[in-house]
Image (tube, rainbow, N blue to C red):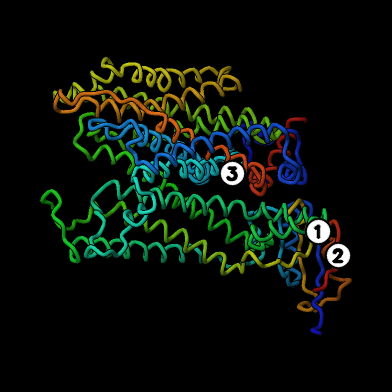
Amino acid sequence: MASKENFLVGIFEDEDVLLHAVENIRDKAVKIKEVYSPFPVHGLDEALGYRRTRLPIAAFIFGMTGTITALSTQIWMLGFDWPMIIGGKNFYSIPPFIPVTFEFTVLLSAFGMVGTFLVVSDMKPYKWPRMYDNRTTDDKHAMVIDLGANKMSKDELRRILTDNGASEVNEKSF
Amino acid sequence: MQASSVFRESLVTGGKTLADVSQDISCQVENKPSRLWWTAFGISLVLLIYGGYCCWMMLWNGIGMWGLNKTVGWAWDITNFVWWVGIGHAGTLISAILLLFRQRWRMSINRAAEAMTIFAVICALSFPAFHMGRLWLGFYWALPLPNAFGSLWVNFNSPLLWDVFAISTYFSVSLVFWYMGLIPDFAVIRDRAVRMGHMTRARIYNGLSFGWDGAAKTWMRYESVALILAGLSTPLVLSVHTIVSMDFATSVIPGWHTTIFPPYFVAGAIFSGFAMVLTLLLVTRKVFKLEDYITIYHVELMNIIIIVTGSIVGIAYITEFFIAWYGQVPAESYAFINRATGPYWWAYWSMMTCNVISPQLFWFKKLRTNLVATFIISIIVNIGMWFERFVIIVTSLHRDYIPSSWTMFHPTMYDIGQYIFTFGLFFTAFFLFAKFFPVINMAEVKSIIKATSEKKNTQAH
């Protein structure tokens, strides 16, 4: 049996207390594994030192793929593969192809970005997530500290969490 | 440390805590449905079954069952299509455009409004699909798929084909946007089910939530996705009704051939959509006791949007008339005079009364904060917007170029039956949504709870 991973879970009631706690605790060179919240807390990602997500780039690349695919498909189909005379107009011209090109760009961009989000966040219907405290989807914030990754003792970390406003500190092993 | 203006009213009343939000919204999913819900659901189901029978008869015998004739080749089918698509637009406006403008009042109404969008678009899609006669071939004909004729491709120059792409993209992107919002809320219900010991329910909602855990990193990515989806949906929703209006505007029929159609249709769509959101939410807040989340202030703001869009629509009607006179094209002038004074005058004046006069009543604060008045006017607006599409479509067609083909349109029970079918479908889907899915976005409402309660404290001082 693999050795168990041990965590300290600090519970916070208020998002502003939590934000200050994250900054102070990181200043003390304590490594925070992750923070779990019932709603997005603004500024928390910067306080935790996360790099900005690159999902917008993914959205852009998927969108451009859509633009190029839709435009070239339409030009090829009506301009070259089977040119049709419709009201004596050009076999192909760009303006009437813009609506479909735009819609396909949006479609690919949206689905591509959401798909990428699910993949990078490792989310899937049959996955049961590791919940450190299942009240975090209700009304509590939880700061998780990996005991194995920090040099400080468990009691010292527990004291730091309490000093920074944690209403309770629990131990959790997986 | 949320900034809140002293001029703004609270968005959540009753001094709710975070736990109250989870409790108030999730209990609708967890408890057995009320007798009121069963009654409403039953009525919708009856409408769906009757309408389904009419649709089946129509599919079996062909669309000759409709009241269309040689002159009026488009009538209730396309009227209902445009009407339902228009209704859908409010959901996207609330969730996407108001998100980009950082309007926090969207938060307690966006979930239900987006659900309305999705169901309305499904109803709308049913009309062109049935109008193709052979439903089972529709998808094959409408999409650029390789075929045995050459391949003979679809005509990308046609606004009808643009519609296929616009509506299907709009539907699927709205669905994804709505579902993204639901993911964290499904996790709330899952974790409550774990605490209550309902493991089957926990497993179902965990699957629906894609194993959501609420980590700060996931929230960061999630917010970025929501913002970009909003940015994509905003031009998308404007393009959809623009393209729908081009079905008419790119033709040469007097009364349709006008450049004002795209903005005028978009304003009309938002106008009717907000009316439908109000109709639905006033009922939902009563049945599910959500008065603290969907407040009078929310209703008032939506009524203000109804004044704005209703006035835009009114100006568009007048502009059309002015241009018909100013342009001095006899056919065009006749089409408009015939609308107002011809055999369909009653439809035209119903439209004018419902759409131009009734929303102006909301200039009175007493009326726009009165729930009964709002409910009645919201229904009047939807009737008016149905007449708008009917007037544009049928009055422009019924006086053909040769007077010998002049005629009237009379709906048969199958025209009416299919309209009833979409009502049944819409309300059955909405009641199922309201029972099994959280009707208010809990995560978003929780993020403004503190600002609201802080403000309450300062007011008490």
**Does A32 sit left or right of B142 as displayed?**
right
Give the residue at the far right of this rendering.
A155
| x then y, percent, for residue B420 | 48, 33
Residue name at image x 19 percent, y 36 percent: B252
Q: Secondary structure at mark 2?
A: strand
| x then y, percent, for residue B167 | 40, 48
CA separation in Å, label 2 and label 3: 35 Å
Q: Nearer the viewer, residue A35 or B51?
A: B51
Q: Secondary structure at mark 1?
A: strand
Residue B230: assigned label: none
**Does B45 sit left or right of A2 as displayed?**
left
What type is the residue that disc 1 sits on?
Ile
**Does B253 sit left or right of A110 as displayed?**
left
CA separation in Å, label 1 and label 3: 29 Å
Q: Quadrant of residue A126?
A: bottom right
Which residue matches tag 1? A11
Q: Nearer the viewer, residue B297 or B116?
A: B116
Mark found first going from the N terminus, 2 or 1: 1
Residue name at image x 69 percent, y 38 percent: B452
Residue name at image x 73 percent, y 35 percent: B34
- The vertical placement of B337 against A127, above or below, is above
Give the residue at the far bottom of this rendering.
A1
Give the residue at the far top of this rendering.
B341
Q: Nearer the viewer, residue B436 or A42?
A: B436
What type is the residue that disc 2 sits on?
Asn
What type is the residue that disc 3 sits on?
Arg
CA separation in Å, label 2 and label 1: 8 Å
Residue name at image x 29 percent, y 65 percent: B146
Tag 2 and tag 3 share a subunit: no
Contact between labelled residues 1 and 2, with CB atoms less than 8 Å apart: yes
Tag 1 and tag 3 share a subunit: no
Which residue matches tag 3? B111
